[in-house]
Image (cartoon, rainbow, N blue to C red):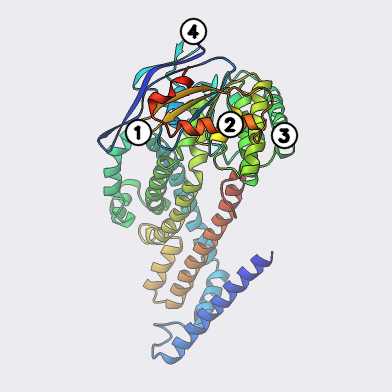
Amino acid sequence: MSYIEVERATKEFVHDKTPFTAFENISLTIERGEFVCILGASGCGKSTLLNALAGFSPVTRGRVTIDGREVVEPSTKYVTIFQNYGLLPWRNVQKNVELGLENRKLTRDERREIASKYIDLVGLSAFKRSYPRQLSGGMQQRVAIARALAVDPEILFMDEPFGALDAITRSKLQDDVRALSQIERKTVVFVTHDITEAVYLADKIVVLTPNPGRVKAIVPVPLQGPRDRVSHEFLEFQNRIFDLFHRAPDELVEYMI
Amino acid sequence: MKKTLRGVRNVVVSFALLIILWQAVFSVSHFSEALFPSPTTAFKALLETIQDGTLVGNIAASLKRFAIGYASAVVVAVILGLILGVLPRVFQFVNPIVQLLRPISPMAWAPFIVLWVGIGDAPATVVVFIAAFFPVLLSTVSAVVNIDPIYFKVARNFGVKQPYALWKIIFPAAFPQIANGIHLALGTAWVFLAAGEMNGVQSGLGYMVVDARNNLRTDVLLAAIITIGALGLALDGALKFVDKRILNTWGGVEN
């Protein structure tokens, strides 16, 4: 049995009295410690799928289980990182990172110490007293990552976390997230529409097609060791993923797992 | 600092223009001094009421009623607004009542207010309360309803539960818009303070207006009117200053 299991999951909404299917019949499994990217164009229901995994908005049919237990609500065991950071603008960096620790049985000093450790880890030691608006987008996202890691979750759900950042900042944060997920031994489920990003980060890529969202292919990434965005193998594999978006479903068998 | 100086200069220049205009209209008009006091007469009346102590006494009485009525309205309306904001199903039923009561001038209640709470400080305080209550209540509810859903997601994800979420997440997230409502209500409440003091009470700036009218002292009347305007302006400025300070530490708003 896998760590995260999604079995024939479907999500339907009723919007303005018209029913709408965000995704349909999605089945996939994720192992502990795996870095999985969910890749697809806008409207393929990838964020909705992540919301279902994270317990914000459970599936309407099928089942989502984490560690054998059905997901019905959010938990600090699996924390979501949003594209627009979700920092609390009235709290400084230190207090933002302490948010998830406040309902635990910790003294104020213990809380401060844990938060400081993760702020140091994301390289923002000098900005503990700063407020989110005083930081750049990339720094704000680092704060959100520190806040997530501070509660020591098993899984990080990341919803297009670098979508609002410039290319240089984005590639730096990609390196950091990959490194952090390995150091901290987290399972990461990362939603993106950026093929290069998915190929660079993932152990396994779940390709979704839109209207409604369906799994087109689940592709393990064969690249070993540190990845080079301009190496021959990298570009070749990236092209294969790119091709997937332009092929009919019956041609995909060779990539299916 | 430079900005403040420029602000002061603008105020001085604009008030000087107003007084010049006033004097000019007085000079060309055929009204007697008793019907349309000149700036000098009004200023003399102002000095007179300062010297005999009536102005200060009336200001103190007015400010006390205003402070109690306005502060209690803000506290009650914000708390009620936060609760109704997170319970939209309840608000559905409360809202029609609010919309029915809101357009009624607090002064329309004046006869009942005197019957129910008697005379003295209470009626004007209640009028101020009513005037401030509805704008603050409605802006608080709409502030809570319009909170970016991401804050609720973050709260759920990090296990911030009610009632903690109310003051850790909901109140601060809604605060900038609530502050806006509190600020708007200040002006409205101040307008109704003077009106509220025209019934059932023997002190305050509103009473001063009525009393001057009854004594045919248009110069004192005008002195009272100017004082009401000046104090309203000063209160607004003070609240603006406090707002800015709080919103700065709130971190949500740029200067």
Q: Nearer the viewer, mark 4 or mark 1?
A: 1
Extreme-left residue of the structure: A17
Q: How many marks?
A: 4
The amino acid marked with disc number 2 is: Glu
Which of the chains bears the disc numbered 4?
A: A
Q: Residues within 10 Å of mark 1 (few under 14, many from 20)?
A: some
Q: Based on the displayed image, in which of its 4 quarters is residue B215 positioned?
A: bottom left
Q: Which mark is residue A17?
A: none
Q: Quadrant of the N terminus of chain B?
A: bottom right
Residue ID at (47%, 20%) = A254
Extreme-right residue of the structure: A126
Q: Is residue A6 above or below residue B181?
A: above
The amino acid marked with disc number 1 is: Asn
The amino acid marked with disc number 3 is: Gly
**First in sequence: mark 3 vs mark 4:** 4
Q: Secondary structure at mark 3?
A: loop
The residue tagged 2 is A236
Residue ID at (41%, 33%) = A44
Spatial CA distance of label 4 from label 1 is 30 Å
Spatial CA distance of label 2 from label 1 is 28 Å
Spatial CA distance of label 3 from label 2 is 34 Å
**First in sequence: mark 2 vs mark 4:** 4
Q: Position of residue B171 (x, y in %)?
A: 49, 38
Residue at mark 4 shares a chain with residue at mark 1: yes
Which of the chains bears the disc numbered 2?
A: A
Which of the chains bears the disc numbered 3?
A: A
State the residue in front, B101 or A207: A207
Q: Position of residue B29 (x, y in %)?
A: 40, 90
Which of the chains bears the disc numbered 1?
A: A
Q: Is residue B100 above or below residue A190?
A: below
